[in-house]
Image (cartoon, rainbow, N blue to C red):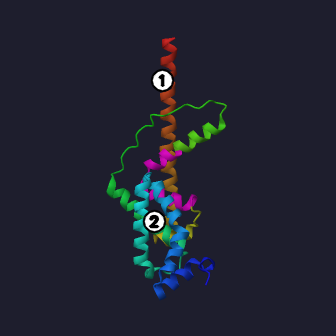
Amino acid sequence: MNLKKLTDEQLVALFIDTQKNAYFEQLYDRYSDKVYRKCLSFVKDDAKAEDFTHDIFLKLVLNLSSYKETAKFSTWLYSITYNYCIDQTRVSKKYSEVGLDDNFDAPDDDDDAQMAELEAQRLNKAMQQILPEEKSILMMKYQDDLSIKEISDSLDISESAVKMRLLRAKEKLRKVYLEGVLFWGVVIAKLVSLFLRND
């Protein structure tokens, strides 16, 4: 039997029926890197992300029998991943302020690539400053491309609640992002005025 041709759901059913590791290992091979990358986006630390991934798959193997095919396996796994990362983030720190980047470089006006990189950095910093729950629902929608219904199923909340949470999370992210842009605008203006004064 070619395991690679089996769907996720078939592998889950076969593993539950037979308890053969080969079926679970195939699921692990398919998803461990994706789960690791999601963990890394929360903790920004390779070793911690690896520990989280290990813990999530351990949790998965213990709870596989509770999987219901009402949602895709990948959606169910990502929801376990997000919930685990949110819980760990809560445990490890209260939502502390993100420090300013000492390596800030103002890009040349004509350098589009550098400007795009700076925008990405600002957006990433803004993502670190919103609550883990807000970050995870935005990632589910815009990174994993899950539908409102899939998010609703995985978080076990109504579709209207998903829409409301998405709206609030987007507003919060926009506010934090714009505050960061304004902050750097003020810093740059003050630096320019100091240079002009010293000339």
Q: Which mark is residue 81?
A: 2
Q: Secondary structure at mark 1?
A: helix
Mark 1 residue type:
Lys
The amino acid beneath tag 2 is Thr
Quarter location, residue 9 = bottom right
Asked whether residue 157 is in view, the answer is no
Q: Is residue 7 visible?
A: yes
Vertical side of 198 occupied by 19: above or below: below
Left or right of 192, for residue 55: left
Choose the circle earlier in sequence order: 1 or 2: 2
The residue at 51%/70% (across/down) is: 152
10, above or below 134, in the image = below
For residue 179, above or below residue 93: above
| Residue 142 coordinates in the image, percent (x, y) | 57, 58
| Residue for badge 1 | 190
Residue numbers of the magenta segment:
123-143
Q: Residue at x 57, y 66 (%)?
A: 146
